[in-house]
Amino acid sequence: MSVEAATAEFVRRVRLPNDRRTPAAARAVVRSVVEEAVLHELLNEALLLTTELSTNAVVHAGTDLDIEVVGDPDGLTVTVTDFAPGPVEQLAVGPRNDSADIGEVSERGRGLLLVDHFASRWGTVHSAAGKGVWFRLDRRGAARTAEPPGLAEPTAAVASDAPGVTALQELLEVGPSTPAPSSSAGDTLAEFAGELLTRLARLTGASGAVVRLDRGDGMRQFARYGRTPRADAETVRVPLTVRRPYAGDLELDAAPTGYTAPLAALVAERLSLHLENDRLHRTDLRRQTWLTFLAEASELLAQSLDVALTMALIPQLVVPRLGQWCAVHTTDEWGRLILASATHADESALAQLHATLSLTGDESVLARLQEASRTGTQVLLGAPLEGFAVPLVARGQRLGTLAVGRHTVGRHDADEVNVLEDVARRSALAIDNARIHDERHKVARTLQQSLLPPKLPTVPGIGFAAEYVPTGSEVGGDFYDVVALPDNRWLVVVGDVSGKGVQAATVTGLCRDVIRILAGDGRPLPEVLCRLNQTLVERGHGRYCTLAVAEVCRTGSGALSVSLHLAGHDRPVLVRASGRTSFVGEGGTALGLLETITSPATALTLDAGDSLIFYTDGVTERRRGRELFGIERLRQASVPLAGYSADVVAARLRAATISFSVEEPRDDIAILVLRNDA
């Protein structure tokens, strides 16, 4: 900045960058000269016109600008020059583009109207480097001074002393205050608009003013001063330059004379800027709300792996937030759309909705749904159901359609349509995941059933009963079996192969087959266990197996003689008919870990009414938080079961294990009961 002082003359020349803060800097330069030259009565008009010209230069020229301020005893001269090519109208008037963006601070001709009204005279300047506009403000009673050298012929204007310009200008520059935590931004903006109308009406002498605003939910009165302008009265009406869905206007109950129209247009423009900020703020909050909604919807959909439950949940997420009704159709093996679930905000209309969207419903609606599914694009739905349908596509496969009814406030806006399409994508993926899980679950259950005996044998005097609780969609390694041996003997087997999945199922099947073959050939149990151990070491793929094996035969007195071998398995519970319980058997080596194993035999006698309960670690390791069901709780649960049949004992132990915790079982549960029914 250079400062040149002359006799009774104060001069400032400053080059300012193309920045939104430039108008404020230009005002500071003008204010400093006004104070030095003691021209305080010209300050308001000087700051207003400087703001207009510098703002126009920043917005429309796109270059740095020079501001020269000359103060003398008779008045003030301000010149704003830019360095952009083209006629001077681009600085003072702005580009002649009918589709001007809301970001343009001044509309065409508004700056010149204010300059022409408030300035004593004004004109344009041209040079090889740039172009600009100057204006002169004379003191009252001062002699007219010569125009600045090198300036074009000025345009004369009548000086004006407009009361209230200072208050209006400050309000336009500051804008609405930050709302308090207890108030909303909309209320604060409405108060600001009301204050703006009040000052504008007092400045122009209008008896009333009103701002009407439509935020996409209908035109309403946003702010008012005095009486509402009458339809038959002469008024000044200026549209608000805001983007959809916002629309509105400012109407002033005053004749369009003097500076009434330019000031009304200026106020409408500045208010439009604040309303556009309000629109952007509301849009941002709305989009954040939609993102939260989508995140919550994804979480809810991800928690369900049941196909029917997932499809029933989708319409509940949509209605009533995104539409009056919602329906999910899925495609069957013949390509037909089958109504899977539907809901309506009005429960009394739900039956009619089902009738219209079912396979025998309205053919025109079904045809539109079929089109959306076939083409994979959004399709509008006409009468009798207004709305639109979006396809459900997951992993390139078309699963059906998601149909949504018209929103209560009218048509869906672009954000709502995007959210619905996103909901459709997430819903389709959730349905597909549920179907995959359901298919895997069916495969796992089928494979699991193939590893268990279809039913236990019925033997007079001996009771066999089993309970099995699978978990998850993978095949577990728990199994049980009862094998008939020669000489009226029976082999009871309960085992647990490490791990889950297809490989564990393969090892489980291998164990069952080896035991059945070797035991059927009459091999003694120690040899059966050794041969099985050798097989698992060679072909078990690193998996091991714990096993409880008992050979059972009836004695002449009616008792059951049991030879029990444990290969790393939990000891079974012996429940006497008297109610006395104990754990029996000696621990041995799990199969598949070592080349040689030990498996001591334990001889038992089951008298009439006695039971022997075999189980896997899914029972004792059933969790409730950090607490385990445990072997002691298992023993206590077995005490009151003395004297009951084998199937009752197995069922009640299963119920006691499951009811121990509200959590889903983490491991398969297998229980096998051997009882002397003599």
Image (tube, helix red, strand yellow):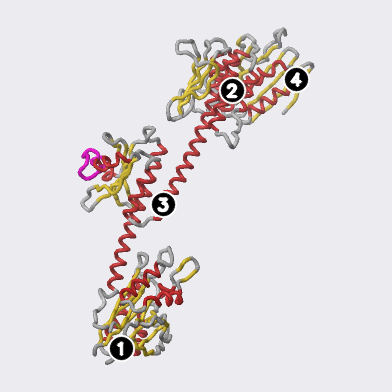
Tell me which amino acid carries mark 1. Answer: Ala
Q: Which tag is nearer the camera, tag 1 or tag 2?
A: 1
Frontmost residue, 240 versus 567: 567
Magenta range:
357-369
- Per the image, is 359 magenta? yes
Q: Which tag is nearer the camera, tag 3 or tag 1?
A: 1
> Alpha carbon of mark 1 to alpha carbon of mark 2: how far?
103 Å
> Alpha carbon of mark 3 to alpha carbon of mark 1: how far?
57 Å
Q: Quadrant of residue 594?
A: bottom left
> Alpha carbon of mark 4 to alpha carbon of mark 2: how far?
37 Å
- Indicate which disc, 2 or 3, sits on the residue closer to the N terminus: 2
Q: Which tag is nearer the camera, tag 4 or tag 2?
A: 2
Question: Do the numbered discs 3 and 1 sit on residues whose CB atoms are within 8 Å?
Answer: no
Secondary structure of the magenta portion, mostly? helix
Q: Residues within 10 Å of mark 3 (few under 14, many from 20)?
A: some
List the residue tagged with mark 4.
Answer: 10
- Indicate which disc, 4 or 2, sits on the residue closer to the N terminus: 4
- 575 w.r.t. 328: above or below: below
List the residue tagged with mark 3.
Answer: 300
Residue 77 place in picture, x, y as percent: 68, 17
Please tell me which residue is depicted at 46% across the width and 24% down the height of the picture.
220
List the residue tagged with mark 2.
Answer: 195
Question: Do the numbered discs 3 and 4 sit on residues whose CB atoms are within 8 Å?
Answer: no
